[in-house]
Every structure is written in C-alpha cells, then in structure tokens.
Amino acid sequence: MKTQENGNTHKGYRRIIPSMTALLEFEAVARHGSFTLAARELGVTQAAVSKQVRQLEENLRVQLFQRLHRGIRLTSEGQALFSVLSESLQKVAAVFDRLGEGNSEQELILSTTATFSQLRVMPRLGRLREAMPQVRLRLATQMFTGDLRNQDVDLLVRYGDGRWTDGHAVQLFEEEIFPVCSPAWLARNGAPDSLEALYDTDLLDADATTEGWMTWPTWFRELGEHPPKLRYSLRCHLYTDTIQAALHGHGVALGWGRMLDHLLASGELVRLTDLVVRPREAYYLVVPHGRDTTATVLGLVDWLRS
C-alpha cells in the first residue's frame, strides 16, 4: 500500500519550482532593490533578469514587485517569498563554505557600526572564543545601520527603540552618557564645579548620526540647560576618533558608558562628573525575518552583554 507523503514532496520540487534561475535572480533583485544592480551582480543583462522575474510572477500568479516611478518595492507576497528564500540560500551557502574549507565551524556575519565594533566587540573577542569556540565571526562594519534586505548579514546591532519591521529585535542593554576625560587632562585642569564651567572646558565632539547619536548641545538640553555657542577643542566625524582624542588628553568627550566600560575599568578614561543622561533608546541585536533565534544567537546576546 502506497503511503501518503507530504503533498509538496510527492509532487517533486521540480514541478513546484519551475526555475531555480528565476528564484536566484528574484532574490538578487529583492536584496538590492534594483534590477540593474542585480544584473550587475549576476553578470547578465537587466532585460534577462526582468524577464525571469516576470515569468516567476506568471507561474505564481502573483505580483512580487510594485514597479514605481523611481524604483521597485516588494509586495507582501514578494516579501514572504524573499524572507524564506534569503534564509534558505544563506544556509546552503554556509554549508558550501564550510564543506569547501573542510571544517565544522559556524560563521556568522555580524553587522555593526564602527563605534560598536571597535569599542564593544573587539575588547570581547577573547571571551567569545572561550565561550563559543565553534563560532567564527565575520564583522560587516559600516557607518550607519540600514535595511536588512540590502545586506548579506546574519545579525545586526542597532541602536533605537527596537520597533523595526525587517527583523526580530532582542535588547542587549540600555545606555547612559556622561563626560569623560583622561587622568592626565583631569590632573592639568581639574573637574568643573558646575555645568556652566563645563561649557568652557576643552570639549571634544563627534558628528550626530541618523541613529540618534547624542552631541554636547543635546546632552546639555536633556539636563535642562541651554548653553551659549560652545567652544570645541576638536570635532570629529567619527566617535572613535573623539575617544582617541580624549585618551590622548586633548579634552572632554561624551562617554557612552556601554562602549567605554573597558577603558573606564582600566583607568585610561575617568568620569569627570556625576551628571548623566539616560536615553530612551537602547542597543538591540536584530535577527532578520525568516531566521530563527537559535541557541547560538542567544549565546552571542550573552557575550555582547558581558
């Protein structure tokens, strides 16, 4: 007697999925948000990619993309297909990568900003090797975090309110912000005895980012102060450069406590005052839709919190 199998398996994948090529080209278009960029990656013409996607839509009898005046956008059906396809292809690619290198290690691509990578991740790599020796980390460092659909990453660190539509967010930790300087600067200048005195110190600052990065004027306003035009000793594009300037004794920077805890613990930086601002936002580890929050992911959460 013939056993009843799963309907999809019984039909055979080839009958259900007429063209793997079309799926691969659809995934590239969805990931890039562009037929042109997908064609460039795949080494084919834009017309060929467009034709494959059209045929896929006809086979499925659904529209996968909204064709807009200046671009494209996934429909809800397209998003559903992309989520499961992206996860599946990355799992296949990971197996190929692992088999090709002849090892059983698990590589995870973690996307972070340069600040988080240099100040939070790098000091803790030794602990990761001890706690999770099977994990190989690949850092995808960038200026700002963005849409997960446009990134070939497994996990992403974000700072914000945790309400994002392209993945599941697991809170890492909240933040607190306070003035910091080097012991040498403090010995030369002494601690300011008021907020007004802090206005006139050698302030170091970094440019604000789209992620809600706090600058000196914002920090003062959060404390109910409205200082006059501030005098900066140095302004930097990157926060990491601002911290380097503080370490070298060039002035007072805003210290993001969770980024600088190792420098404060070692005494390389010190808190200048007890004044502190606690933002409403927090740091999160974002798992893209279609992927599971596995034991490995939770292990990385514990490591990043440590």
Image (tube, helix red, strand yellow):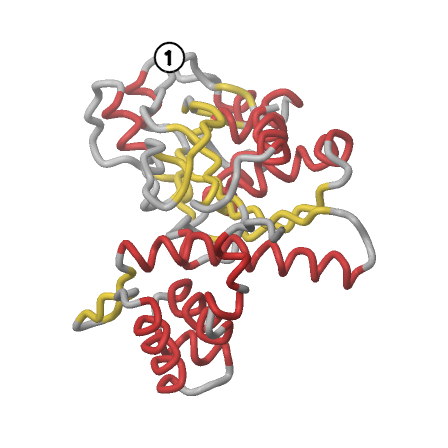
Q: Position of residue 54 (x, y in %)?
A: 32, 77
Q: Position of residue 182 (x, y in %)?
A: 56, 27
Residue 81 seen from this side: yes
Disc tally is 1
The residue under the point 48% across, 23% down is 189
Q: Nearer the viewer, residue 223 or 198?
A: 223
The residue indicated by pointer 1 is 193
Q: Is residue 100 above or below residue 218?
A: below
Check disc 1 and report its element: helix, strand or loop: loop
Q: Is residue 273 above or below residue 88?
A: above
The residue under the point 39% across, 69% down is 29
Q: Position of residue 291 (x, y in %)?
A: 50, 44
The residue under the point 76% across, 40% down is 134
The residue under the point 43% across, 74% down is 38
**Relative side of 47 to 126, left or right:** left
**Relative side of 63 to 295, left or right:** left
Q: Nearer the viewer, residue 305 or 86?
A: 86
Seen as rendered, the residue at the extreme front is 1
Seen as rendered, the residue at the extreme left is 69
> Label 1: how many residues lie within 10 Å, few (<14), some (14-19) or many (20+)?
few
| Amino acid tagged 1 | Asp
**Relative side of 134 to 214, left or right:** right
**Relative side of 14 to 69, left or right:** right
Residue 82 found in image quarter:
bottom left
Q: Is residue 117 above or below residue 51?
A: above
Q: Position of residue 91 (x, y in %)?
A: 60, 54
